[in-house]
Amino acid sequence: MIDFKRKGLAVAILATVGMAGCAGGGDESDAAGEGRETIAVFTKNQTNPFFEVVRTGAARGAADMGADVVQYIPTRPDNIPEQMSQIEDVVVRRPDAIVFTPVDTQAMVPGVEQVNAAGIPVVNITDPVLGGDIVSFVGCDEVTLARDTGRYVLERLGGAGNVVILEGVGGSVNSNNRVSGFMAAVEEFPDVTLLASQPGNFQRLQALQVMENLLQTYPEIDAVLAANDSMAMGAIEALEAANRPALVVGLNGTQEAIDAIKAGTLLASGDCDGFNHGCLGAMAAVRHVRNLPVPDEILIPITVVDETNYQPLDIPLEERMCPAWETFAGE
Amino acid sequence: MSRAAVLEGGARWRAAASRAPGVAYLLAALLVFFALFGPRFASAPNLLNIGIQSSILLLLALPMTLIIMAEGLDLSMGAVLGLAGIVLASALVAGYGLPAALGAALAVGLVFGVANGLLVTRVGLPPFAATLGTLGAAQGGALVATGGQSVVGIGPSLPALYASSWLGIPFSIWVAVAAYGAFHVLLYHTRFGACVFAIGGNRDALALAGVRVHAYHAAIYALGGLMAGFAALLLTGRMNAGHPTAAIGMEFDAIAAVIVGGTRFERGYGGLPGTVLGVLAVGVLKNGLNVLAVPSSLQVASIGLLLIAALLVDSIRGRS
Amino acid sequence: MERAPIQEPPARAVPRVEMRGISKRFPGVRALDDVSLTVHAGEVHMLVGQNGAGKSTLIKVLCGAVHPDSGEFRIDGRPVRIESAADARRLGVAVIFQEFSLVPHLDIAQNIFLGREPGSRFPGVVDRRRMHAQARALLDALGMDLDTRLPAAELGVAQQQMVEIAKALSQNARILVMDEPTAALSDHEIDRLFARIRKLKQDGIAVIYISHRLREVFTIGDRVTVLRDGRHAATLESARTDMAGLVRLMVGREVRTHRRRFGESAGDIVLEVRDLEAENGVHGIGLHVRAGEIVGVAGLVGSGRTELARAIFGADRVLGGEVRLGGQRLPGGPAEAVARGMGLVPEDRKESGLALTRSVGDNLLVAALPRIFPNRWYRFGTAARIVADLIARLQVATPSPGRLAKFLSGGNQQKVVVGKWLGAGVHFYVFDEPTRGIDVAAKAEMFGLMETLVGDGAAVLMISSELPEVVALCDRAYVMRDRTIVGELDRRDLTEENILKLAMHHE
Amino acid sequence: MTAPAAWPLRMPSIGYRLLGVAALCLALALATDAFLTLPNLLNVMRQASLTFLIASGLTLVIVTAGLDLSIGANLGLSACFAAAVIQASGSVLLGAAVGLASGIVIGVMNGVMVTWLGLPPFIATFGMLWMVYGVNYWYMAGTTIYDFPQGFRNLGSGDALGVPVPVYLMAASMLVGGLFTRYTTWGHDIYAIGANREAARLSGIPIRSRLMLVYTLSGAMAGLSGIVYLARLNSAEAGMGDPLLLPAIAAVLIGGTSLFGGIGTLSGTFVGALILTLTLNGMNLLTIDTNWQPLVMGVIVLLAAWLDASTRRRAEARA
């Protein structure tokens, strides 16, 4: 369970009132000492917990190397023109390097090109951007991630049964990769029937409603393969409400998923640790600035987290430590 | 009846200043604040950035001004922009030239604009409901056509055009300036413009003047659709791709900019300069906060604060 | 008549306009019933009649704004069809409307040339310089010293009226219709206007002139047509008739100016206003009304009558002074005024008197709810009973209480507005132009109703531009000018002449 | 032509709408066996009830010719606050109270802006939407709060006597709302304000306090919906209300409430929510690509608006 060390509601309400007063207070990084590099970190939204993990990892990774981070998140979740604007604004500010998660792998290519033109190094994390020059890509192969997780659940089914797939945002590269990974796993088991593959937009509520409807259509569902943990949790809600047990797997290895694995409601979550994306992304950026070698690609190993191996991930986010650079980026 | 009958030059200026929307003062305050505290905010590249970032929104906000002055609303603009972008990109991918592709995008925009216009004037639907309906149609159309994916591989012609600049000013700013100029002439120097004022201000007077009110009224919406189609040129050029949901919600930003700029839903009150101020105020705010590296959650709240503060200034000044 | 010197004498010449057998029904009203009108070139043809007699409808038919159910038009002897405003304009009809047709945020020149803007070299683009020059010339001809770049929203009522006139004149019309053009004008402005009209006559323009000021029939008119209850009553040569004859024709057989029985001594002071000043411009207002009294407020258009009513009621913000109702000072705001027993029957009932899209029943009860249902619990049985009672008492002609208010005739709508105050148990009424736009019969009912109210001990403040009504109905009257009260006339001095003397400027 | 004793009727063309519901049901029953099953129908009722809960307060706002664009953001913030308090204190009641209170506070702030400050509702509540999201993003900092006691979760996903709990909530709020709008003078005042604000003001209706009430109710219903959604999802995150705004507006419009004010009912909004849910449910059952959903929703909104416009025109032609 996450420990919510928060300032409490009163502060929140006070802050609403005082928002205007502190709007100008964010000028921290320029005041920071000379010689400390500033890394601008771009993530897709402030609603998905995965990216909070990435941001925390990046902050930790940079801090470990004695650098500062500045976070940029579109005010509207996953908004393409807005991330483009933020890139333009950041180019003016000239950080030493950028750690970049594109909101869209295709449409953000001109953004990366703009950063290239300004001569600021870019480390691409999590989702690959399909153009421009990058120092390094830190992430994992999402097709493999989904295939391994899918394989895991289908083996637990004994290689036979009826399954459904909950897709992410229709057409997004994340969703496509993950779904094709699931599909690959399903095809490995001839006795497994894929009943349906429907989009839940990576959202819990939509997955819940889609699952409720699927439960009406199909009297027998043995397993649910969800393209992220939020949707897996939504599916579990629907299954529990209908009293129809099924094996559910998700992807991302979020804290919520780990708690659900501990509680036995979620079978497993394919994890490609977002914390390490952030850590190594920031480290790679700082290393590049310091003229230390950085490989073109750092693939974070994939773990299918289940009730046997969740412990390393089950610590509060703020207590997690970045791995040593050499752990994943050897030699 | 002993009112001052003649306005002298100076008095006209003062009258104009007194009519300036509250957002003008907020914009000035923001500029001063960011210039003082934002590193390199006042540099030429950054000011150009604000222009680039505001240009697409301005292309939507200009016709939205006319639509709102005519006591209407167009919620479909963002979705139509998205769909037109898909069409533009797909046409380029299919190997058509840029003019043909732009023509197709404009045609898509026009079709939706005309549909909005007819639904409002002929079928008599409330503009909010009519354009909410076409919003769904355009957005659904874009999603179905692409399966939610980006349309890529549009070739070099549009990106090259978008990246070009003249006299050191980027293409998109020239487009925005030209669009403003065109709309300025249209609203203040043509019969069409007088009709826009009259449709909101005194529709009966227009009808009695023998003008075909419905046609002009529908034309305002058609213009809105057309501009949404045209804005696809900039959006697609900016992303080097077409994306079905890239412009979702932009209509609300445009409406907010227009209202903050002093245009009102009643009596044909409003104008284009205020809309420019409204668009710029939001653009400057977002840019300045990025330059200051203010946390995103605070940026989100600041946008709301700006909108409400601008209206509040108007409301207080309106009372005194 | 330079244009037709070789033709037969004017009387038998082909008329410029002929309207024959025009009929028009609106929901609940027969607005025009077989009306004919013939106007010659170079003639000023007066059109008179009471409110609701059909004058405005006839004009709207002529200019294409209203389609008649039957009837035909001829212009210069040729049968024509007028289906739209554009048709009318093409045929040379220009109209100065009573309800202003100006667009608030366009300037004077744009308003004058709305829909006919002079073009420039570029298609669709207006030649503004030429437009303003032409507008300037038109205003100069009317002796108006206004900047043509001023938006209409910033003009006073008289100025708006003059712009309307300039707009009509600019159309080089062959048939010019003026609907009460002098209602808001000062003597000086009226003189200039009449000079202009005489010039138009010489140019062979046919002028149709609607007026409530019967004197104008003799100062400017050649012939006069009287309408009554939507029917043609008579057409006469101005020189061969007199004021009394016209009034007789307008009113009907009996010259029945409504006469109240006066005499009962008035009761206690119900309303007392001291030194009232409001945001809408009225200032220095002092007046009082006693129980059992009908007190009039007269003045020209723009003198601040409606503003006074709104200030007393608290509808517009009060800046200073006090309003006392039944001895207690009102805290301001309509809600408090109503709670203390004051009701306003506003001038523009469609804008602020009624909810047109709600039923008659809902409208009748809207103000009465706190009184009828003090515990806030709405009982439909009680509501239906009270509504039925009010409809019967006021004789509202409606097929059911569920009828939407917009489908009622003007008179019945006005009854509903009054009815909502009856239900609310109000004892002080402000009537602002209670007879505007309603027919003669409804008018008489309205007067009867007001008498009943004061007979039952209520007090009434009646604002009216119809001087005969003020004279006939009021115990006393206050006269307004420039947004303040300039005099009080008691029963003995209450004549139209005295009112006008106070109301007009005498510079 | 005349409808005796029908004069407080404020809902246009309910008959046609119910016909639409019936037609949808019939089509779906023919198209798929899965539709006409008790669990599925209950399922539809549950989803429609939730949509109704959000849209109910909005209905009243729109009846006054106003608008509240902040309900989605409000729902999210209320859910997050409620979630945090439940987790911190272990008290569901306290959490629900805080969630409801936060909804009410936002509603009151909207009301103050619209009435006392005289700001146009569209932009005032749009600005509020941004402010609420800002606070929520800051407060949640990208995290999710999850895992609540089963008793609380039943509020959203449980059944009682075989019927989903949200259906009871919907029925209760419809009953209370119906009584409020139909059988109290406040309700009648609200319709009067929407039909003609100036006339209502000059009839002595205290406009500001009535509008305050309506915006507060809208905020309260958003807060309540937040709690129910929290229970249903068993988790809270900052963006959870975002996808719920447009469907709520659509449900109100499909239900026949006029944006010009003065016309509309809560039962209409429920029918609107039902039509919306049935359509989406049917599309899911028939496994139609979800990309079609916005288009289909748009067409339904247009159809409903057209229905109202044409019935109104016919009524006027008859008069």
Image (tube, grey):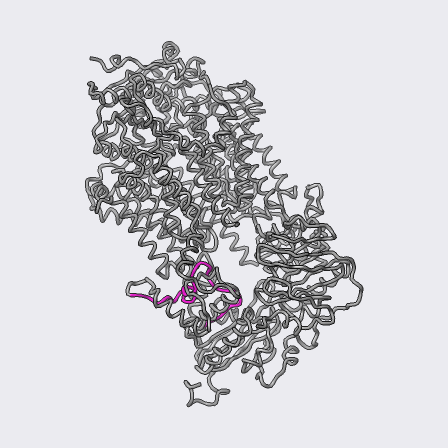
Residue A194 shows up from this direction: yes
Residue D305, given in percent of the width and then of the height, sits at 47, 47
Residue toward you, B130 or B286: B286
Farthest residue in the right direction? C264
Q: Quadrant of residue A57?
A: top left
Task: Give yes or no for residue C113 being in the magenta stretch.
Answer: yes
Tell me the quarter of the picture where residue C268 sits: bottom right
Q: Is residue C308 magenta?
A: no
Q: Is residue B97 left or right of residue B303?
A: left
* Number of marks: 0
- Relative vertical location of residue D33 with respect to residue D17 in this rendering, above or below: above
**Camera-side residue of C74 and D44:** C74
Rendered location of residue B221, percent (x, y): 38, 52
Is C472 or B295 nearer to us in this picture? B295
Q: Residue at x 56, y 21 (%)?
A: D92
Note whether C85 is above or below C44 in the view shown.
above
Q: Is residue D172 above or below residue D207?
A: above
Q: Position of residue C227 (x, y in %)?
A: 59, 75
Residue A226 showing in the rendered view: no
Magenta stretch: give its range.
C94-120
Position in image of residue D195 (x %, y %): 57, 50
Q: Chief secondary structure of the magenta span?
A: loop
